[in-house]
Image (cartoon, grey):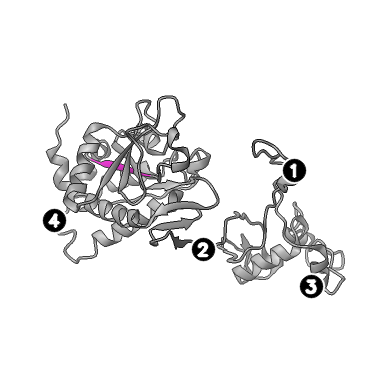
Amino acid sequence: MVRTDKGDFVQKLVKIDRPILRIPTLAIHLDRQESFTFNKETQLFPIAGLVAAELNRTGGNPKPATPESSTESNEPADVHFSPLKTSTERHHPYIVELIADQANVNSPSIVDFELVLYDTQAACIGGLNNELIFSARLDNLGMSYCSVTSLINSVASPSALDDERCIRLISLFDHEEIGSTTAQGADSNLLPSIIRRLSVVGPGSEKMETAYEQTLATSFLVSADMAHSVNPNYASKYENDHKPEMNKGTVIKINANARYATNSPGITLIQEIARRGKVPLQLFVVRNDSSCGSTIGPMLAAKMGARTLDLGNPQLSMHSIRETGGVYDVDYGIKLFEGFFEHFGELEGKIFVD
């Protein structure tokens, strides 16, 4: 948040596209433990640099951070009074300088900021035949990319929506890994409120008291979150008949305890869409003696009552700093979602459920 010359406060998005911090682990030689454990309060501090290097940068005499207020100023006292310490007092001044440079402002104008650390190493293609993707945050940027690209592709033709009676919509949420209970998370009213507003845009629909409910009843939600590929080093962790493989198609996720929202009518629909696009699909069911992750699918299905199916492209090393996915699965995911946007309106009326 930046204070402007006019006294307004403006939000700016910054990205420092180089590695400035690193969290070092303790060498295994100094602490041989069977499991990798650490204290989040005392052992996860990032290192930003060395004191000697900072002294060299500042000429050996770094200026101490001082409040902006001054008793010598002729301006009213309330102009310089700060309820909190300034940003350069609360944080290393050079960090604030880097942020200010990215925002194209000066350091004193920065009121507050939120930073998220991420792996700056670029994704790359690997494998003997260049069939693998090595990247951070495939979960869930992988399916987000497929969704955005397929939506754009589905309306590329000028006549793509001429006979369309449905609204093609994607929704990308924050904070799925920490519960989704935020203003921009899936457990917010963001998606329901948007659908409610869209449900009354048609002629005469504003007079229908149940337009929103009818819209949900005829809608279909695809919860697209990356799936687990079989790990050959831990093959026993997977159910014998459900071992998805990378580059063999998008995975439909099923769970009897409703950790995933998939059911038979949904499988029927997505299978028919995949058949038309010649997109291979796989099924995944977790072992009965294993824990199971979840997605925002069941959460949104319960909130809106819309038909829902969980799927995702298979990957290895989910939630690690460097994940692994299949190159061809990206194309499969895009083709599958394109088919969903293009054919749902027709197929929806052909699936009958009592």
| Circle 1: residue type | Thr
Residue at position x 68%, y 52% in the image: 23
Distance in Å between CA atoms under marks 2 and 1: 29 Å
Q: Quadrant of the C terminus?
A: top left
Residue at mark 1? 42
CB-based contact (under 8 Å), mark 3 and mark 1: no
Q: Is residue 94 visible?
A: yes
Pick the quarter of the image with the N terminus. bottom right
Q: Is residue 21 left or right of residue 53?
A: left
Q: Residues within 10 Å of mark 4 (few under 14, many from 20)?
A: few
Give the amino acid type for the residue marked by disc 4 in the picture: Asp
First-in-chain label (2 vs 1): 1
Q: Find numbered disc 1 in the image and state the secondary structure of the residue it sits on.
A: loop
Name which of mark 3 and mark 4 comes first in the sequence. Answer: 3
Residue type marked 3: Arg
Residues shaded magenta: 219-224
Q: Are marks 3 and 4 in contact (CB under 8 Å)?
A: no
**Crowd around label 3: few <14 · some 14–19 · many ≥20 (10 Å):** few
49 or 60, nearer to the observer: 49
Asked if the residue under mark 3 is in contact with the one under mark 2, i.e. CB atoms within 8 Å, the reply is no
Is disc 2 surrounded by few (<14), some (14 to 19) or many (20+) residues within 10 Å?
few
Residue 156 drawn at (x, y percent)? 24, 65
Q: Is residue 49 above or below residue 349?
A: below
Instruction: Work out how far the residue at label 3 is from the one at label 4, CA to CA, in angstroms.
Output: 64 Å
Please identify, in this view, whether the residue under mark 2 or under mark 1 is nearer the observer.
2
For label 2, the residue is 122
For residue 57, which numbered disc appears in the image? 3
